Image (cartoon, coloured by chain):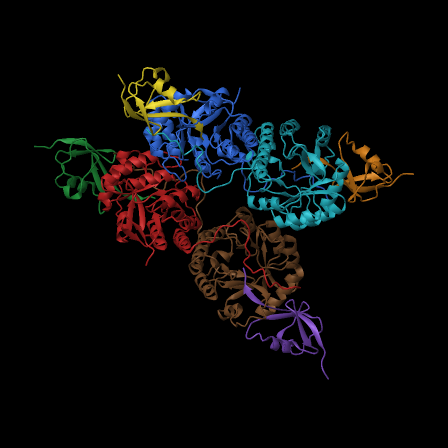
Chain colours: A orange, B cyan, C blue, D yellow, E brown, F red, G purple, H green
């Protein structure tokens, strides 16, 4: 049986993902290499150890951030 | 006995904090961090560029050098964004220290005292060590100390303006009344600015643009290192008083006759 | 390639000149000369106390340390006394360098430009290398340069006053227009004062009271050493400009949303 | 035959010396130890090598100076 | 068309507000109010001395002269006292205008921004016209404007200190960003201080100690009146720019030859 | 008893001297001379344009208004030109008063102390009343007083620069030590500058560019008139002292309780 | 029948007044002459027109204030 | 007999005048109208009352000045 597709937002841009995608799967797909990052879903920070079990819901707003030069 | 700076139990040999904003290249940043001998480095938190394939990132670079990283909340437009930024940076950098910037004014980037106070209270309740960037308002500084901030960071003049010290009298009062470290931030343009702040008793200074954007950042990092040391030593060495007339440095007796 | 100061062909690694007036003890003087790393030390010329039986004298001490000794003409009330003082100091110290002080004003010890000019001319004719102490008057500085002085030494504020820098704009113009080294003298109270003068392009500074009379002279000597270096390096590193508004040190793009 | 005494001034104070006293003799008498000094007679600097041959005249004003702390 | 100051619909010909604190005598106060030509006079609210049998009181005196009376909240230690003071002053003086002073600091008497903000909100809700005394913090000034304050009254330096203007840059920014009148308050010592504030665009100044405690208060009242006018007219007359070099005021052509 | 200024026996009700350089039109000049109420007006001496057929000349205009005219020596490159200029102006204007400007520096137009001293001596010998323009050098001022100058005219900052007061401390010392009137000249940009000079005891000020080149010269002339008066009255009214802490203007007793 | 006495506080000082005293009566007694004043009872401002009908209760804290020199 | 012509300099410019010209004649010729001026010949100021008798010599340098705006 096919999984349904739905929209989410990553860093303000629309993405289409499949139902039941986990954060781990999303991150793999985004191919972030060795970049350091942290992540919040709907303004809630999700720790790395919970990525595996975290299933992304439709319309989620995901922020993936890192550190840049700042004063 | 050393003269280290202690903030919330953490010890720093260097009283010069360095910002990473507007660095010209990672090489240049590396150079000026080294020459400055700073142990406390600020960063901003921004969305990752998902389309960028480069691996080299600032954070790994800083972690490798075993520097203390102080994330700021620059760019946040309200308290919710400030709190999310801090929680993300805690997860990212594994530190509960944050430099709180609560700014509404896009032209002078002057911090909002009410938003700063509210955000600081919430962050402290969530377990953060808060180092707030503030205008040089002694009463605000006292309020922030009372709710448990780790330092206050009054500005010398607007961020990146290179205007030097515009509020010296107010900073003096903040230093006089503060029981937590006072880190003078923003506007310092030359080593003498940093030195002067240390001479009047500031515990540390934070410098970014003046080093990162100097023609020779590496050298300027060293210059600020020396200036901060000069000022600190002077503060501990008891400067001469200011008097209204001259005081001869050569003796006035035993003058010869021609 | 080094960044040494050259005055009349003589090279100095240190751009900090130190006065020996009002030192608390020979031990203290020794300490602060060492910590300052100065290579140019001023002394005054006075009648020998014929009734004093002690052998230890300042001069032998300084000669032993192989320091350059710069005798001044402080206390001279007219040109004859200035010239005799210089001739005596040449015989005594075996140097034709003199720091010319031509002062009539007992309260602020401000130098007299006319007497300075006249004395400088006479001394140069007699073969002296003249380093005149002057008020921060650019036209006077130019006159003195033209008759062959080795440096000009404009004052920052009255001798021993600890008032810091009161004539910054004039000193800037002197530096801009001068082809001979500019050594800022008098009034400098804290390392940031020295640093600031170096940052705007002074070639060296002369400090006496601020070190000799600090609570801890040895440390203050070190502080000034560092401040002078900081300022010099800054001068050579291209400081950031002064702008009228703020310039963010953290980027304004890629802001997150809460 | 006895030498005549006369007055001179050293550093502003009156001294009585004998006729034909040289600077070398005067300096010995003043017992200056190892102190560094230079000297002028009547506003004329006299070099050390000429002390021996320099005979002090009556009413001479002698300045004997050294270096002291100064700025 | 006149150049009157308008605050909350009320028009003032004079841009000089005068305090009555520390006046030497009612006669002296009368004199300096007259010579200053001020139309806005501040008073403090204090417990009546029940044992004092004298009838002459300050208030009747001021009312008789048909001056606008602005009660302040000086001395209040918390928001409840501020509100009670304002309600009492409204009953006493029949005005809903108040100069809000929310001060915790007994040494420098610097206002507390958080308490000021809170008190201002409550007072505005109760129908008061609030003129808050503040440190020269542009972001705070903007906050107070947004909640409906009638003016902001940034300080030039601590109350009664005679220190003149210590925060000029910050006051400039407040003036630039403000849509409500800016009345510079506290610390002004001489007419040139008042003039300078008006020249950079302040709408009015409040002076107390500098007049009340001058050797000749009557004359000093006149001097400030003139200074404020001078500054205001200058502001409206377009001052010359600041340039880096000289610009001859005598022509450089048609020079004669000797 | 009046408070008139007296220079060499001549009495002035106004302590504001006005320059005519760079006036926009004769009408504008007329306006600002009137509004300033100045009684002492400077002019420069230049070759007559032989090809110009217009009759209206500045001098007739000034003479008609019965103003005191003070010719200057601006533009003279050496002492001969200075003396010829003064002798010509004496013949032209029928006055032996001259404002001596001895300037070699085309960029900052700073006066040369040596040439000034020499020219002043020669001019005084020839019967002139000499008002020399000088840098703010107290020892030079004293020298010029001793040879018989009628005033000294120290500069606040370079001519026409609009930089305001850059040498306040030196001007204070000149005022303190001078027995002849001190007229502060050059660089004054706004009425508060003039007021400040009068407050510290200057006898008069000379203003040119700040009025002549203001957007509205007539109004600016009035503004300076008021500023000079404000400063003078303040000087005679005994200003309050500068203290290091605040001093409450409202009483600290009889506080109410909420 | 006698009225009971009780304590009140005026400007921080203890006073004894009789039961049923009105503000009007109190003010008369205090003999304030022509002085301007305003008044609060227990942190509540009482307008002059209500003095007549206002009966002071035991332990009331009354503040009577006026204007003094202030900046 | 004709008068000889020669050169003089007025305000730095060459002029040709006739021998025996007086200052009065020169000024008339220059047609200065009612302009205020003063005048020096070879760095010597000549008073107006002497113009009539002052004969201009060859190569004279004449400066004719007036007042202009100055500070």
Q: Residue C101 location, x and y as percent?
A: 39, 31
Q: Which of F132 and C109 is in front in this view?
A: C109
Q: Which of G66 and E227 is in front in this view?
A: G66
Q: Residue B58 location, x and y as percent?
A: 70, 31
Left or right for E115, reference H14: right
Query: Relative to E116, is F155 above or below?
Result: above
Res. H48 image quadrant: top left
- Quadrant occupied by the N terminus of chain B: top right
Q: Which of D51 and F252 is in front in this view?
A: D51
Left or right for H55, reference C211: left
Q: Which residue lies furthest to the bottom in this view?
A: G1
Left or right for E161, reference C158: right
Query: Relative to G39, is B173 above or below?
Result: above
Res. H51 image quadrant: top left
Q: Can residue H64 be seen in this view?
A: no
Query: Relative to B146, is E126 above or below?
Result: below
Left or right for B234, reference F84: right
Q: Residue G32 location, x and y as percent?
A: 57, 74
Res. D63 image quadrant: top left
**What count of labels does the image hold?**
0
């Amino acid at each position: 049986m096919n999984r349904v597709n739905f929209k989410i937002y990553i860093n303000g841009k629309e993405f289409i993902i499949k139902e039941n995608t986990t954060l781990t799967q999303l991150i793999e797909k985004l191919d972030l290499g060795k970049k350091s990052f942290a992540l919040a879903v709907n303004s809630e920070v999700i720790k790395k150890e919970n990525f595996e079990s975290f299933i992304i819901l439709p319309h989620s707003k995901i922020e993936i951030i890192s550190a840049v030069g700042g004063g | 006995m050393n003269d280290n700076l202690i903030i919330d139990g953490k010890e720093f040999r260097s009283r010069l904090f360095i910002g990473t904003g507007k660095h010209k290249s990672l090489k240049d940043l590396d150079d000026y961090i080294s020459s400055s001998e700073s142990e406390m480095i600020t960063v901003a938190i921004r969305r990752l560029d998902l389309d960028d394939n480069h691996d080299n990132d600032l954070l790994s670079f800083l972690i490798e050098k075993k520097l203390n990283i102080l994330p700021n909340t620059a760019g946040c437009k309200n308290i919710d964004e400030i709190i999310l930024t801090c929680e993300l940076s805690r997860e990212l950098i594994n530190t509960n220290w944050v430099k709180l910037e609560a700014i509404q004014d896009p032209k002078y980037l002057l911090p909002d005292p009410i938003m700063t106070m509210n955000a600081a209270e919430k962050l402290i309740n969530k377990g953060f060590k808060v180092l707030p960037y503030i205008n040089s308002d002694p009463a605000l500084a006292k309020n922030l100390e009372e709710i448990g901030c780790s330092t206050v960071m009054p500005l010398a003049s607007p961020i990146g303006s290179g205007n030097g010290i515009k509020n010296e009298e107010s900073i003096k009062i903040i230093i006089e009344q503060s029981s937590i470290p006072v880190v003078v931030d923003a506007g310092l343009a030359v080593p003498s600015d940093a030195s002067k702040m240390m001479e009047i008793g500031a515990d540390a200074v934070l410098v970014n643009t003046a080093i990162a954007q100097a023609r020779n950042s590496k050298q300027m990092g060293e210059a600020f290192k020396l200036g901060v040391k000069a000022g600190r030593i002077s503060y501990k060495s008891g400067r001469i008083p200011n008097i209204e007339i001259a005081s001869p440095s050569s003796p006035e007796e035993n003058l010869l006759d021609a």
